[in-house]
Image (cartoon, rainbow, N blue to C red):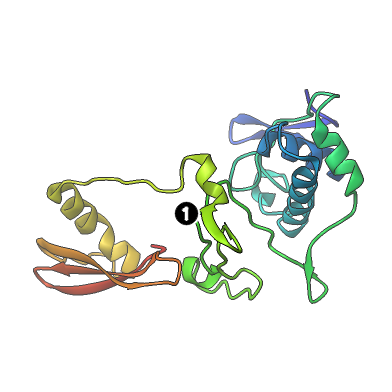
Amino acid sequence: HYFGGLRVSAAGGRLRVVEEADLEDYVAGVVDAELPNSFPLEAMKAQAIAARTYALFHLGDHAREGADLCSQVHCQVYRGAPPPEAPAWRAARETAGEVLVWNGVLVDAMYHSACGGHTAPAWEVRQGKLLPYLCGVSDRAAGGGDAYCAARGRMNWTRRLSWWEAERLVSSNLGTVLGQPGLKPGRLKDLRVAARGRDGRAIWLEVVAARGRYRVRGDA
């Protein structure tokens, strides 16, 4: 079920339904959706602080849809009110009002379920996102060993493409990625990683085609 009132309006021939919820109730709902109930309370409290900070930083992101936030992963997962016995309530209550700041300003408190063993600096992932507190850090304990996110089972993955599939993707998308609509690179000859960050992720990908060599940012 849901917390507050529901605001229903007509939008483009369809009904738009927006829930109005108190911030702390919303935080409890996010924590319950983002973490299993088996997690330690302190982990849930950390999640509550991150979720609260993220919500306040991104208020209004969905103003065009008549809401502050959505319920999808790119906002935060939210499925309404948790059961009364859920530990998420306690995590939200015991951290009520607590947020993360940098130089007195709310931070963009992004988080994830799996990071591949090392996070990437924000400026290597999104152009123009020069936030010094979003730097790349290891997900391993100080003494080494396995990364914490390895337990999620999605730390490493492989996707295989045939040469024809790769050529079709390059032909269809290279011009858009480079900001050169209509670009016709010609037959694909090679793809290679031209530069990697400290975390091992590709920063630049070199595309070698019949009509030239092109460099594409790794985040593209």
Q: For mark 1, give the secondary structure.
A: loop
Q: Point out the image quarter for the C terminus.
A: bottom left
Does 41 sit above or below residue 136?
A: above
Name the residue type under label 1: Gly
Q: Residue furthest front?
A: 143
Category of crowding for the residue at label 1, using alpha-carbon neighbours closer than 10 angstroms: few (below 14), some (14–19), many (at least 20):
many
Who's the residue at 75% across and 30% down the image? Answer: 80
Q: Nearer the viewer, residue 4 or 100?
A: 100
Q: Nearer the viewer, residue 213 or 102?
A: 102
* Residue 110, horizontal then vertical, whole percent: 64, 57
Q: Which residue is mark 1?
A: 116
Who's the residue at 70% across and 46% down the image? Answer: 69
Does 213 sit above or below residue 11?
A: below
Q: Nearer the viewer, residue 20 or 96?
A: 96
* Residue 148, horizontal then vertical, whole percent: 57, 50
Q: Nearer the viewer, residue 42 or 96?
A: 42
Who's the residue at 79% across and 43% down the image? Answer: 27
Instruction: Determine whether, in the image, residue 167 is placed left or right of residue 71.
Output: left
* Residue 42, horizontal then vertical, whole percent: 79, 46
Does 80 sit above or below residue 121?
A: above
Instruction: Determine whether, in the image, residue 184 is placed left or right of residue 102.
Output: left
* Residue 161, horizontal then vertical, whole percent: 21, 46
Whether residue 127 appears in this view of the structure is: yes
Instruction: Tell me the quarter of the picture where residue 175 sits.
Output: bottom left
